[in-house]
Image (spheres, rainbow, N blue to C red):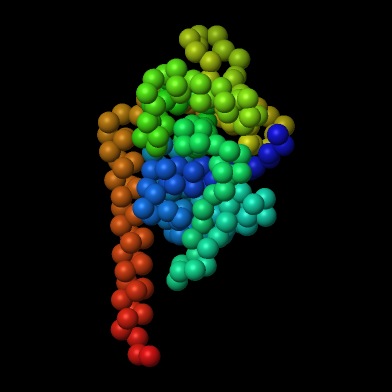
Amino acid sequence: MNIDLDAVEIRVLGCLMEKELATPEYYPLSLNALLNACNQKTNRTPVMQLDEDTVLAALRSLKERRYVYQSDAGRVPKYWQAFAKDHDLGSRESAVLGVLLLRGAQTAGELRLRADSLCPFDSLEQAAATLDHLIALGLATQLPRQPGQKEQRAIHLLAAPTDGPEPETVQLVRTAPTPVEERLAALEAAVAALREELATMKSELQALQSPE
């Protein structure tokens, strides 16, 4: 499967896949909500500081590939991903792939822990089976076990080839998010969602107050 996304496209697609499962009530995402998701300081490896123009350029590229679509039905354009549906991914596959896109190389145990908030996994074996399915589809692969590592790490295969080592293979991966990090991530998502909801309410109120 020849998919060659750059780092920003991977971040944008990963965020859309994550938010579709994590906060379906606020999905599809506006540009502002998507920008906030891309620039989260928790649950992201590496941490990025993107601007609107950079995210818009990535969205245009993803729309050309038909991985992302845009709705102009409301006052603010909204974006949603079609990659999971087009590749026949269920919620568990989408959750695991999304975490790989957002966090880099990880073990099956780390994937279960981090994807469980998006789609519950009954066991480590279930998470491993989901990863195996992604590998069979050509969307992920297992890295060779490095000296000192007890378990193999998996990476996604959506990145464009580079002259150097794949970024995911050299990123530091923490064994598990701390409770403080989990609460901070939840708060960041809630604040972004509330801001989006407030902006929508203001727009609707202004429309009602405007003279015919």
Q: Is residue 174 visible?
A: no
Rendered position, 113 above or below 75: above
Q: Residue at x 42, y 43 (%)?
A: 21
Residue 3 x/y as whole percent: 68, 39
Q: Residue at x 28, y 38 (%)?
A: 183
Work out which quarter of the rendered image holds the N terminus and state it: top right
Residue 27 x/y as whole percent: 42, 53
Instruction: Work out whether residue 181 or residue 189 is closer to the camera in this orientation and state it.
Output: 189
In the picture provided, is 43 more to the left or to the right than 165?
left
Work out which quarter of the rendered image holds the C terminus and state it: bottom left
Instruction: Work out whether residue 128 or residue 51 is closer to the camera in this orientation and state it.
Output: 128
Residue 7 x/y as whole percent: 59, 42
Q: Residue at x 31, y 50 (%)?
A: 190
Instruction: Please tell me in which quadrant of the rendered image residue 146 appears.
Output: top right
Q: Please, which residue is most extreme toward the bottom here?
A: 212
Residue 137 x/y as whole percent: 63, 29
In the picture provided, is 161 more to the left or to the right than 139?
right
Q: Is residue 28 visible?
A: yes
How many marks overall? 0
Q: Residue at x 63, y 55 (%)?
A: 63
Instruction: Please tell me in which quadrant of the rendered image residue 187 appears.
Output: top left
